[in-house]
Image (cartoon, rainbow, N blue to C red):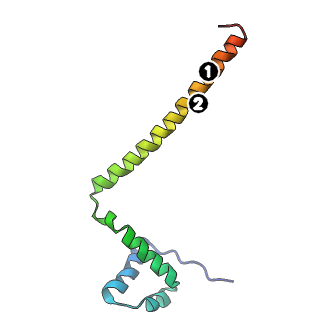
C-alpha cells in the first residue's frame, strides 16, 4: 500500500521554497526531509514564479479583475436566459395561432 499524500498549506510550501532559495538547502535534502517527490517541489517553484506578480498587484486591481470576470459570466448567463425566453415566447405565439386564439 502506498503512502498517504501530504497536504501542505500555502505557507508551508513557501517556507520550503524559501529554504531552498535563501538558505541554499539542496532540493534533494528538502524533499527527503518533507517526504516530497522532486517533481512536486519543481511544480511548486513553477507555480510560485508564475503567480508571483499577484503579490505585487494592488488589492483593488485584483478585486476589480474578479468583479469583471463575474460580470462577464453573469452577462453571458443573462444572454442565454434571454435566448430561451425569446424561444419560449415564439413557441407560445405559434401555439396560440394554431389553436385559433390569436
Q: Quadrant of residue 19?
A: bottom left
Report the front residue among 17 and 42. Answer: 42
Task: Identify the element where label 1 is drawn.
Answer: helix
Mark 2: give few (<14), some (14-19) or many (20+) Cα within 10 Å.
Answer: few
Per the image, label 2 sits on a secondary structure element best described as helix
Q: Residue at (33%, 49%) from the top-left corner?
A: 64
Q: Quadrant of residue 83?
A: top right
Depicted 91 relative to depicted 36: above or below: above
Neighbor class of circle 1 (other Cα within 10 Å; few <14, some 14-19, many 20+) is few
Residue at the image position 62 percent from the left and 25 percent from the top: 88
Whether residue 42 is situated above or below residue 95 in the rendered picture: below
**Residue bearing mark 2:** 84
Give the total number of marks visible in the rendering.
Answer: 2
Q: Quadrant of the C terminus?
A: top right
Residue nearer the viewer, 10 or 56: 56
Q: Is residue 3 left or right of residue 48?
A: right
- Image x and y of residue 63, in percent: 33, 52
- Residue 78: percent from left, percent from top: 49, 35
Ranked by sequence position, the earlier of labels 2 and 1 is 2
Residue at figure coordinates x 46%, y 80% from the top left: 41
- On screen, residue 78 above or below 5: above
Q: State which quadrant residue 4 falls in.
A: bottom right
Numbered circle sitting on residue 81? none
Residue 7 location, x and y as percent? 51, 74
In the picture, the disc for residue 90 is: 1
Q: Quadrant of the N terminus?
A: bottom right
User: Badges 2 and 1: C-beta atoms under 8 Å apart?
Assistant: no
Amino acid at each position: 500500500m502506498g503512502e498517504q499524500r501530504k497536504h501542505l498549506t500555502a505557507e508551508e510550501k513557501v517556507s520550503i521554497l524559501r529554504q531552498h532559495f535563501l538558505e541554499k538547502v539542496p532540493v534533494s535534502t528538502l524533499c527527503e526531509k518533507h517526504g516530497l517527490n522532486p517533481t512536486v517541489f519543481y511544480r511548486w517553484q513553477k507555480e510560485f514564479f508564475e503567480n508571483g506578480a499577484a503579490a505585487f498587484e494592488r488589492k483593488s486591481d485584483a478585486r476589480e479583475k474578479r468583479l469583471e470576470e463575474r460580470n462577464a459570466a453573469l452577462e453571458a448567463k443573462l444572454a442565454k436566459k434571454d435566448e430561451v425566453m425569446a424561444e419560449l415566447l415564439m413557441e407560445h405565439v405559434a401555439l396560440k395561432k394554431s389553436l385559433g386564439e390569436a
